[in-house]
Amino acid sequence: MQNAPHLVHNLAFVVPSYEWWNGPFYGVGLKVYDLLAGKLGLGPSRLLSREETLKRIPTLEPEGLRGGVIYYDGQFEDARLAINLAQTAEDYGATVLNYMRVVELKKTADVISGVTAIDLESGQSIEFNGRVVINATGVFSDRIREMDEPGCQPIITPSQGVHLVLPKEFLKSDAAIMVPHTADGRVLFAVPWHERVVVGTTDTPVEKPVLEPCALQEEIDFILTHAARYLTHDPDYGDILSVFAGLRPLVNLQGGEDTAEISRDHHVMVSKAGLVTIAGGKWTTYRKMAEDTIQQAALVAGLPERPSITRNLRIHGWLKAVDRDNHLHIYGSDRIYIEDMIKKHPELGKKLHPELPYIKGEVVWAVRQEMARSVEDVLARRTRALLLNAELSMKIAPEVAEMMARELKVRRKKRWIKEQLKLYMDVAKRYLPQRTD
């Protein structure tokens, strides 16, 4: 909230109580939470009466409700923060490359001295030399470790989390619902997000990480069944606007099988050849993860000691006074440049679709300033159109492809657009829930 206030805001969470012991039990736990937060706490937790709970969450199931507990946390734009972090690195002199896949680790006298990578757009092979190589590839960490030490013991146990996006009507509140313990011991939440509701999550072990994980029907059914227990209107498949899955890169050094029990902590390790691997962790601790990694990498590279400056470093786009009623606030200080572009070319201020918040100018900005190279880049990661409504995102994809082709000045424009649309449609279809029974 201090380093990227344009992307983070305070969000109230309500824990509903349906058993007599829920309120006191969670109330005490959240008071400990308050104490741990100290002066960085976002607001004191407190017990709510039944009436207060329903006032906060009108669409909460009233039958058997005894009351609730309210606490506060931060909500942030994860994809936007990823982009802003890349831009911040570039602002400080880094060379940032995307669509560059490492295929080999280079070694000199059995010490890692660089990488060989393939430019996925041109197919060109390029060699990069470096005094230290950091493996920060999340669920794919073991693939890079294998390049260094073939046959090494895997450390990553991927766990899949699935989320459903529903219309706002299912949660007519600016507060979120959090159920710490469902019937099978999982956590369930319903969070307001971009005039929609995100409901999740699952914790399903998967054998191998893939770039585009797919939600299993049993996961979707689990979320729908449990959400129905806490919402007055029971959601069904027909209500789902989009379903998306992600993989948690859990570090499993003890060999445990229950992913819910595996620590979310991060681990930094250095191989005999000097490969620095950062694995595990989560967004909440990303800055500390980076500091720990860079300190270790500096030792391997023989670089002079230097204190980290990132604790209070303002992220690219930093802007404290933002108008959250205008969705362009997520661009922070870059918003004025987008608006200036629209003044010169008013057509860029038009929406891509009446039911989505995004405008044409964001497509142009994503290509010019945010390294967007594909339709999926724009609709899934620069904007969140795919996650807000998969079907509508497919409808605007042709116009987005046309705009991008002009901006990128691609050769064989029609062919490029056709290829991009096929790739995007193949991905987007997976975000539409499919019943097999």
Image: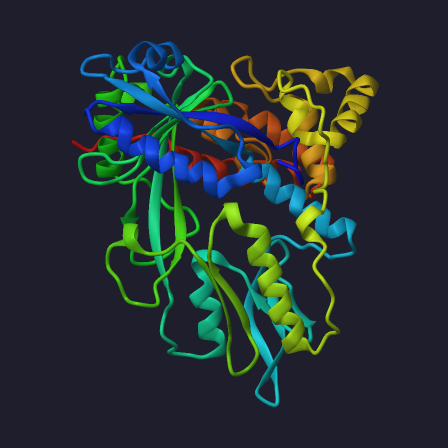
Quarter of the image holding residue 139?
Answer: bottom left
Work out which quarter of the rendered image holds the N terminus and state it: top right
- When the figure is inspected, residue 99 is found, relative to residue 231, above or below; the finding is below
Can see residue 74?
Answer: yes
Horizontal relation, residue 141 to residue 3: left or right: left
Q: Nearer the viewer, residue 350 or 189?
A: 189
Q: Residue at x 65, y 46 (%)?
A: 85
Quarter of the image holding residue 411?
Answer: top right
In the displayed image of the protein, which residue is found farthest to the left?
437
Q: Nearer the viewer, residue 239 or 347?
A: 239
Horizontal relation, residue 200 to residue 271: left or right: left
- When the figure is inspected, residue 430 is found, relative to residue 159, above or below; the finding is above
Q: Residue 221: image x %, image y %? A: 22, 31
Q: Residue 101: image x %, image y %? A: 56, 61
Q: Residue at x 30, y 15 (%)?
A: 60
Q: Residue 110: image x %, image y %? A: 57, 87
Horizontal relation, residue 314 to residue 250: left or right: right
Q: Residue 140: image x %, image y %? A: 45, 60
Q: Residue at x 38, y 16 (%)?
A: 171
